[in-house]
Image (spheres, coloured by chain):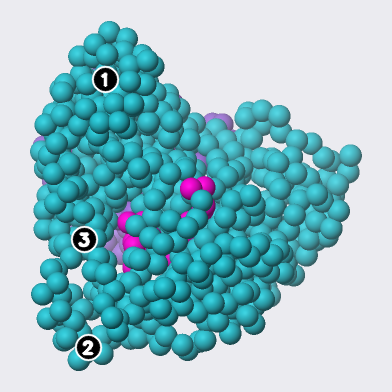
């Protein structure tokens, strides 16, 4: 069967099971947009290519399937580079199809020409410039294979206009060998000897911590993690990328580690004698000063990407493999070595954990030779009680507390609500104060820290999970970067809900200037009402709501929850001077964690803040 | 350091190193120490290693390798690339500066490139290494015969002769080329070009 390159491309996407493309057409990609008219694939027309990329990421986050974006050459591609870089840092599988100028024009500085493969080389797992229409099915199949296997990540397929117009004989690669990837061999199973060695270390540990990263969500390893915790009773901390991998309500969940992590999680890691690092990469926002990070801990590092093993912290046991599979292998090794404490024992442990508090969960292990962790768990419980996450309630005359807004939002939305955030203070508060009970319900920009991620990512998430409520908690600074995608949302019938934590500042930068630059505020003030967020929302076809009083918070959220035919934006006017605590200053040891100052010192600080503003 | 001084990745599961009780990073630093073998003063970093990288023979592959080194802050001392006997593949021989990053990290990051098929680390003591040098030298007629004799001793070839200069070709181990370069320096070097080393594992 003869097809044009463009038809072959769309056909290839159909073969890959693609149900939606986020994109924006242009000259070089024009031929590919023609067969989209007949294709069953839905196309969501974004207003800026960055939005297409983040929407594809949001879709991939919540479905586990690769998100697809399509853009034209030149500025189309350069606009989506941020999303590629974001997906690369957070290992999100997205496939970007880009148009390119015709092959004879490549290298001549033609209209809308850019060195796409060169520009995106450093921010993709791999990219392809297809110069022969006959290669299109193979390139698309290879792109999806590379994006979704091993450590997932973004890929890009660049198609010159003459290649889309050329004719080819249709085929579809039926095996991996057809993909022509001789250098690509991701490993799945862990090395059995290393798994056994890991089990031996776990049996000796008195103060173990499961340090869980986004790899667990990528590998769909949540249930295996739960079973390992049930068997061993080891406390868990989940990084920003792993929020929702383990239920917030579980008694052994210590919360988030790192710069704005809970005192309990940060301190437990510092005092630990064994870190079991699962699909995580010892990011500087977690470790703080690396030589001072968890100084007494042995490290078992499990990751599908061997380059992460030893990149930052030398592991004592390194296991390359899929997080779900290796977690299962480690649990099975522990069960084998300890007299086959099987599912029944695990169930007992689980019930004990739920019923009597975490300290006793180990006792249910049924003949297990695993050590008694109850002293360690008691210590953790003490930290948890003495150093909870907290904030000062709103005093009369003050503006809304952002934490209260987020807590109220969490309380008034179903457990399977998908929470999407931008980057900054609101993101940290969202991670701290949301209750995560269902996996894959948190979509955020972690590694790259991309302001403007929330609105388009929420659109992608809602397209991927139309049955779930999707709320974005966004900052006022972030919102202004990509808000125009709400036009997309309303034009395409994608009813997302946006809660702007409007503190009229670039809040995180303001916080750092307050704490580390002697309150010299430089270029961080934004204004609470320029733009007027309600009018702006309405102009884009949304329902806009403004909330200034605490008693309006819950009714506004309930009103938004009831709207399902268009997007909703709530402008929450929040306290400008609220800071994210706890905080480990950049480059400091995690031992130097700063907690929220007491009321008296805080008030002294606030009076000077007011003067400064 | 595994026996034989040759480690390779591409098909091997690196987890096996860790299972043997030595973490991967331990293995890497062990290898690095071994590389700093005493020897004659050489040009180039004291702690260098040779990586023989088999890559797909496709456009842009060298750019991917170079871009990776640049982005991750790894230093390349020399790099040579040419097709292999199989036209699908090329071999890049790269001498890396181990001051900049642990060898293990460089190898693992390289291996992540989809176009990189396999990587072998060649310890200098276990590899045959050669490099080619072309040098145009100023020749004072009074010392021409002296210079020709020197080229002979080094088993070099005179490949071009001018009235006041000549061009010499010399192949051999990089250290030999260093010595030759040192000896002819005083005669006056007009231009010199070395290829960077290529290497194969000893049988």
Instruction: Inspect the magenta stretch and tell me whether residue A24 lies in it.
Output: no
User: Label 3: chain?
Assistant: A
Q: Is residue A528 visible?
A: yes
Residues at circles 2 and 1 in contact by the CB criterion of under 8 Å = no
User: Which secondary structure, mark 1?
Assistant: helix
The disc, 3 or 1, on the residue closer to the chain's N-terminal end is 1
Image vertical order of residue B28 relative to residue A505, above or below:
above
Q: Residues within 10 Å of mark 2 (few under 14, many from 20)?
A: few
Residue A328 vs residue A154, the one in the foreground: A328
Residue lying at 75% horizontally and 54% vertically, measured from the top left: A42
Chain cyan in the figure, letter:
A
Q: Which residues are magenta?
A: A415-432
The quadrant of the image that shows the N terminus of chain B is top left
Residue lying at 69% horizontally and 65% vertically, measured from the top left: A565
The quadrant in which residue A199 appears is: top left
Residue A581 vs residue A481, the one in the foreground: A581
User: Which secondary structure, mark 2?
Assistant: helix
Q: Residues within 10 Å of mark 3 (few under 14, many from 20)?
A: many
C-alpha span from label 2 to label 1: 55 Å
The disc, 2 or 1, on the residue closer to the chain's N-terminal end is 1
Which residue is under mark 3?
A582
Q: Position of residue A573 (x, y in %)?
A: 41, 79
Q: Position of residue A72 (x, y in %)?
A: 68, 66
Chain purple in the figure, letter:
B
The quadrant in which residue A551 appears is: bottom left
Check if mark 2 and mark 1 are on a common chain.
yes
Q: Position of residue A562 (x, y in %)?
A: 61, 63
Which residue is under mark 2?
A610
The quadrant in which residue A223 appears is: top left
């Amino acid at each position: 069967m003869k097809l044009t390159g463009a038809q072959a491309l769309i056909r290839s996407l159909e073969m890959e099971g693609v149900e939606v493309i986020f994109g924006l057409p242009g000259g070089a990609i024009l031929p590919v947009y023609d067969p989209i008219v007949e294709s069953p694939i839905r196309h969501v027309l974004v207003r800026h290519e960055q939005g297409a990329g983040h929407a594809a990421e949001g879709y991939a986050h919540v479905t586990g399937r690769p998100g697809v974006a399509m853009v034209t050459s030149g500025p189309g591609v350069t606009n989506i580079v941020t999303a590629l870089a974001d997906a690369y840092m957070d290992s999100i599988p997205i496939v970007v199809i880009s148009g390119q100028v015709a092959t004879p024009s490549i290298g001549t500085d033609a209209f809308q020409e850019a060195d796409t493969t060169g520009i995106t080389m450093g921010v993709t797992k791999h990219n392809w410039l297809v110069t022969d229409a006959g290669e299109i099915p193979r390139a698309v199949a290879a792109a999806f294979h590379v994006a979704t296997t091993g450590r997932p990540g973004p890929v890009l397929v660049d198609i010159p206009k003459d290649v889309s117009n050329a004719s080819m004989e249709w085929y579809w690669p039926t095996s991996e060998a057809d993909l022509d990837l001789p250098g690509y061999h991701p490993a799945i199973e862990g090395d059995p000897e290393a798994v056994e060695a890991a089990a031996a270390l776990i049996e000796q540990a008195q103060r173990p911590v499961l340090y869980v990263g986004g790899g667990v969500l990528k590998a769909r390893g949540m249930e295996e993690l739960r079973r390992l915790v049930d068997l061993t009773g080891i406390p868990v901390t989940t990084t920003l990328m792993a929020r929702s991998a383990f239920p917030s309500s579980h008694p052994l969940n210590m919360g988030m580690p790192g710069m704005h992590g809970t005192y309990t999680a940060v301190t437990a890691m510092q005092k630990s004698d064994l870190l079991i690092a699962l699909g995580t990469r010892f990011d500087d926002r977690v470790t703080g000063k690396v030589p001072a990070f968890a100084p007494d801990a042995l490290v078992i590092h499990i990751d599908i990407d061997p380059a992460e093993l030893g990149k930052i912290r030398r592991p004592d046991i390194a296991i390359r493999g899929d997080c779900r599979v290796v977690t299962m292998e480690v649990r099975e090794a522990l069960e084998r070595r300890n007299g086959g404490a099987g599912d029944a024992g695990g169930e007992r442990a689980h019930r004990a954990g739920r019923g009597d508090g975490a300290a006793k969960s180990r006792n249910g292990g049924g003949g297990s030779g695993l050590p008694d962790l109850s002293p360690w768990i008691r210590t953790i419980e003490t930290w948890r009680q003495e150093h909870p996450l907290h904030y000062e309630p709103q005093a009369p005359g003050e503006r809304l507390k952002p934490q209260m807004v987020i807590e109220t939002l969490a309380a008034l939305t179903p457990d399977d609500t998908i929470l999407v955030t931008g980057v900054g203070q609101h993101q940290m508060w969202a991670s701290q104060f949301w209750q995560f009970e269902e996996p894959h319900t948190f979509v955020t920009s972690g590694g790259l820290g991309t302001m403007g991620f929330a609105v388009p990512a929420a659109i992608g998430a809602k397209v991927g999970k139309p049955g779930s409520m999707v709320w974005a908690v966004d900052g006022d600074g972030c919102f202004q970067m990509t808000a125009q995608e709400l036009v997309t949302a309303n034009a395409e019938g994608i009813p997302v809900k946006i809660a702007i934590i409007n503190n009229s500042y670039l809040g995180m930068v303001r916080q750092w200037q307050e704490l580390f630059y002697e309150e010299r505020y430089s270029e961080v003030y934004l204004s609470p009402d320029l733009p007027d967020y309600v009018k702006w929302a309405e102009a884009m076809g949304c329902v806009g709501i403004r909330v200034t009083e605490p008693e309006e918070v819950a009714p506004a959220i309930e009103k938004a929850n009831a709207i399902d035919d268009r997007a909703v934006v709530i402008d929450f006017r929040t306290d400008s001077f609220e800071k994210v605590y706890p905080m480990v200053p950049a480059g400091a040891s995690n031992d130097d964690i700063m907690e929220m100052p007491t009321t008296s010192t805080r008030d002294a600080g606030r009076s000077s803040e007011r003067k400064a503003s | 350091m595994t026996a034989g001084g040759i480690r390779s990745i591409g098909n091997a599961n690196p987890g096996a190193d860790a299972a043997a009780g030595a973490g991967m990073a331990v293995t890497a630093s062990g290898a690095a120490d071994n590389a700093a073998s005493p020897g004659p003063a050489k040009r180039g970093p004291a702690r260098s290693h040779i990586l023989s990288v088999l890559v797909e023979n496709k456009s842009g592959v060298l750019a991917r390798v170079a871009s990776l080194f640049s982005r991750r802050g790894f230093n390349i001392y020399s790099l040579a690339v040419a097709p292999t006997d199989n036209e699908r593949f090329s071999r890049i021989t790269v001498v890396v500066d181990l001051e900049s990053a642990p060898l293990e990290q460089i190898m693992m990051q390289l291996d992540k490139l989809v176009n990189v098929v396999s990587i072998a680390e060649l310890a200098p003591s276990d590899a045959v290494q050669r490099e080619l040098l072309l040098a145009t030298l100023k020749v004072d007629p009074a010392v021409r015969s002296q210079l020709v004799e020197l080229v002979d001793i080094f088993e070099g070839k005179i490949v071009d002769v001018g009235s006041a200069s000549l061009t010499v070709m010399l192949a051999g181990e990089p250290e030999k080329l260093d010595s030759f370069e040192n000896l002819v320096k005083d005669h006056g070097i007009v231009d010199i070009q070395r290829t960077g080393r290529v290497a194969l594992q000893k049988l």
